[in-house]
Image (cartoon, rainbow, N blue to C red):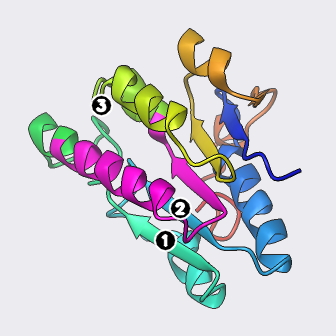
Amino acid sequence: MNRGLIIAYYGNGKGKTTAALGVALRAIGYNLNVCMVQFIKGEWDYGEIYSSNLLKPNFELVIAGKGFVGILDDDHDIKEHIESAKTALLIAKEKINSLRYDTIILDEINYALKLKLIEEHELISILEAKPPKVNVILTGNYMTDQIMDIADLVTEMREIKHPFKKGIRAKKGIDF
């Protein structure tokens, strides 16, 4: 019961961060502490920024990314994204080992791995050395075989249908 889990939500479907936040909401209901470190998101306006303030003192949001990498409005050099992701990984390691949190969410870390912003062996080292009672949740579109092997729970979100394909733009409170 006290063994912390490594949980991964990945895939091309929506809901990975939302699933992680659902776990956070459940944990906070039991007065547990949660920290979310965001590896990619960062410069956009999105709901987690505002709702996280309502969950204090049991929830901490650390926005460490420079925004999504390589999309139309990305005005950062790849070196800036790499530096931000490396800093996020150091922050994640500190939060995991601090024993102040019951659950740590590493949001979009799987995507940071895919983009080679961080090294997989560094993440695996952190996960293997995590304190026994700490839960760690990994999100992002992609999943490596090594991460899948060490995870206790892996859920793939698969897109079946998406409103964007009908021309429906992202909705505030639903998509961001």
Of mark 1 and mark 2, the one earlier in the sequence is 2
Q: Quadrant of the C terminus?
A: bottom right
Decide if residue 142 is on the left or right side of residue 120.
Answer: right
Callout 2, which amino acid? Met
- Rounded to the nearest whole Å, what is the CA distance between mark 1 and mark 3? 20 Å
Quick one: label 2, few (<14), some, or many (20+) residues within 10 Å? many
What residue is shown with label 3?
Answer: 118
- Was residue 86 drawn as part of the magenta stretch in this picture? yes
Q: Which residue does the image show at 39% across and 49% down from the upper left?
A: 39
Does dot 2 land on a helix, a strand or a loop? strand
Q: Position of residue 3 (x, y in %)?
A: 77, 46
Does dot 3 land on a helix, a strand or a loop? loop
Q: Position of residue 49 (x, y in %)?
A: 50, 76
What residue is shown with label 1?
Answer: 61
Q: Which residue does the image show at 26% across and 54% down from the upper left?
A: 66
Callout 3, which amino acid? Ile
Quick one: label 1, few (<14), some, or many (20+) residues within 10 Å? some
Range of residues picked out in magenta: 83-109
* Occupied quadrant, residue 70: top left
Decide if residue 91 is on the left or right side of residue 77.
Answer: right
Callout 1, which amino acid? Leu
Q: Which residue does the image show at 49% across and 37% down from the upper left?
A: 129
Does dot 1 land on a helix, a strand or a loop? strand
